[in-house]
Amino acid sequence: MGLPRPPGDFDRIYSPPEPPETARRPRLVRLLLPVMGAVAVAVAAVFLLLPSGEEERGAPAPRASRGGTPASANSSSPAPSSAGPIYTALPPACRSVSAETVRRLVPRAERTSSGNTTFGYCGFGSPPSAEAKDRWLQIDSRLYPAAGAVTPVDSARRHFDIKWALAGKATEERTVTLERQSGLGEQAYRWFKVDRQRPLAIGEVAVRSRNVVITVSYSERTVGAEPSAAQRQRCLTEATAVAREVLESLP
């Protein structure tokens, strides 16, 4: 016995639904489809060919600098870190300190020197027969030009930072004091050390002024086995005074 037949009459025998008649689209739609596709391709091509900066309507064009180059062309170059002149040459290192200073610090000094317009070295040493033996005054000056995108000031700053880092890791000398120095150039430090091989007390001062780094070292024989506080102060004071004198000689 089967299931009871639901009430109601059927108008026709059941058949599955027919698929939609896709072939019966309006003629106008079929004609417009190729045209709409071509318009979309053309619009995409226009946006691809637009140069950068012209996609946004009304964007102002970059203003030209005094040299005629757009200002935006140099936006990636780092600007100078501080205002002031850039040094273009160095004076001879041995002329950057007065003869009176040399006679006072190193009597009857023997001189050695080398350098050019961007590098200078001068050393004043006491001869073996001098009363004040083992006195040395050394001056090292370095001028840094631009290096690619790095400005002269930044090049000098990097060199000074390296000197500071190496001073804290020195092995040939024994560091007694090492400290930053304010009021001398734009960066400076004072370093008092003792030679491990010879009884020498050494006062060193390094200073950066714009794109020039100057290092002055003054040394003398230690008084006793260990340098005294007075000798430490004297070496650092003399080296600082010479560094100021060298700074004043810069053109």
Image: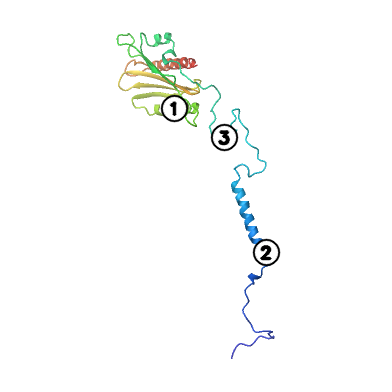
150, above or below 107, in the image: below
Image coordinates of residue 238 in percent, x first then y, are 42, 15
Tell me which label, 3 or 1, sits earlier in the chain. Answer: 3
Could you tell me which quadrant the N terminus lies in? bottom right
Instruction: Name the residue beneath numbered marker 3.
Output: 73
Image coordinates of residue 235 in percent, x first then y, are 40, 16
42, above or below 93, in the image: below
Q: How is the image coloured?
A: rainbow
From the viewer's side, name the closer residue of 93 and 29.
29
SS of the residue at dot 2? helix
From the viewer's side, name the closer residue of 148 and 241.
148
Q: Residues within 10 Å of mark 3 (few under 14, many from 20)?
A: few
SS of the residue at dot 3? helix
Distance between mark 3 and mark 1 Cα atoms: 29 Å
| Residue 93 in view here | yes
Distance between mark 2 and mark 1 Cα atoms: 74 Å
3 vs 2, front mark: 2
Instruction: Name the residue beneath numbered marker 1.
Output: 159
Left/right placement of residue 7 relative to residue 110 reads right
Distance between mark 3 and mark 2 Cα atoms: 51 Å
Left/right placement of residue 167 relative to residue 87 reads left
3 vs 1, front mark: 3
Tell me which label, 2 or 1, sits earlier in the chain. Answer: 2
Residue 29's disc number: 2
Q: Residues within 10 Å of mark 1 (few under 14, many from 20)?
A: some
